[in-house]
Image (cartoon, rainbow, N blue to C red):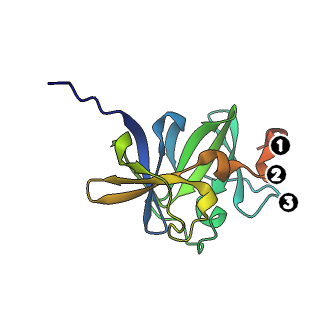
């Protein structure tokens, strides 16, 4: 009998607007509680500002605002997921960050035309995992914006 090998996508699961999302864990540097964010005048509305995280000036993006969801006050469960993307650290504010799971790659499906109210362009696909449906974010598209294109715009600011 042939041995069956299943490949997995190790992902971090987080909550946003009552939906569960996932992204590859290899992008994630750390998960932080909310800290003081220094506002940047003229930044895009979803860019909440920057913070000095262990000596690195890190732009912070509120995913609720980025996806056009209603703003809510940050709570005890609100987290900032620090990811490394295009040689830059970026913080993503989410409602809650849960756990790291292995999603079997054969459970990944292309994104349906409508996934909640998140624009299809931000979605890589969906995954059925146990009794959950996870929305897989396309971080390249989430962060592809003129407001983020100039890394030096953030790095030149003093925190």
Q: CA distance from mark 3 to mark 1?
A: 13 Å
Give the image quarter of residue 82: top right
Q: CA distance from mark 2 to mark 3?
A: 12 Å
The residue labelled by disc 3 is 42
Category of crowding for the residue at label 1, using alpha-carbon neighbours closer than 10 angstroms: few (below 14), some (14–19), many (at least 20): few
Q: Are marks 2 and 1 in contact (CB under 8 Å)?
A: yes
Q: Nearer the viewer, residue 28 or 131?
A: 131
Category of crowding for the residue at label 3, using alpha-carbon neighbours closer than 10 angstroms: few (below 14), some (14–19), many (at least 20): few
Residue sitting at x 82%, y 51%? 146
Residue sitting at x 50%, y 33%? 26
Give the image quarter of residue 46: bottom right
State which mark lies toward you, 3 or 1.
1
Q: Earlier in the sequence, mark 2 or mark 3?
A: 3
**Relative side of 16 to 140, left or right:** left
**Relative side of 143 to 127, left or right:** right
Residue sitting at x 41%, y 38%? 9
Q: Are marks 3 and 1 in contact (CB under 8 Å)?
A: no
Instruction: Report x, y in % for residue 3.
Output: 21, 25
Q: Quadrant of the N terminus?
A: top left
Residue sitting at x 19%, y 24%? 2
Question: What mark, if any, has residue 12 been given in the picture?
Answer: none
Instruction: Report x, y in % for residue 58.
Output: 68, 42
The image shows a total of numbered marks equal to 3
Q: Residue furthest front?
A: 1
- Element type at mark 3: loop
The residue labelled by disc 1 is 150
The residue labelled by disc 2 is 146
């Amino acid at each position: 009998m042939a041995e069956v090998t299943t490949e997995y996508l190790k992902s971090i699961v987080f909550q946003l607007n009552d939906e569960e999302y996932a992204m590859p864990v290899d992008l994630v540097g750390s998960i932080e509680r909310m800290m003081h964010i220094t506002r940047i005048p003229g930044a895009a509305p979803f860019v909440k500002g920057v913070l000095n995280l262990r000596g690195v000036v890190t732009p912070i993006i509120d995913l609720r605002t980025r996806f056009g969801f209603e703003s809510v006050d940050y709570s005890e469960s609100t987290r900032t997921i620090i990811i490394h993307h295009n040689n830059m650290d970026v913080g993503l504010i989410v409602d809650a960050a849960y756990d790291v799971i292995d999603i079997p790659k054969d459970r990944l499906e292309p994104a349906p035309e409508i996934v909640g109210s998140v624009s299809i362009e931000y979605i890589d696909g969906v995954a059925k995992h146990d009794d959950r449906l996870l929305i897989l974010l396309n971080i390249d598209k989430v962060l592809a914006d003129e407001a983020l294109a100039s890394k030096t715009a953030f790095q030149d600011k003093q925190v």
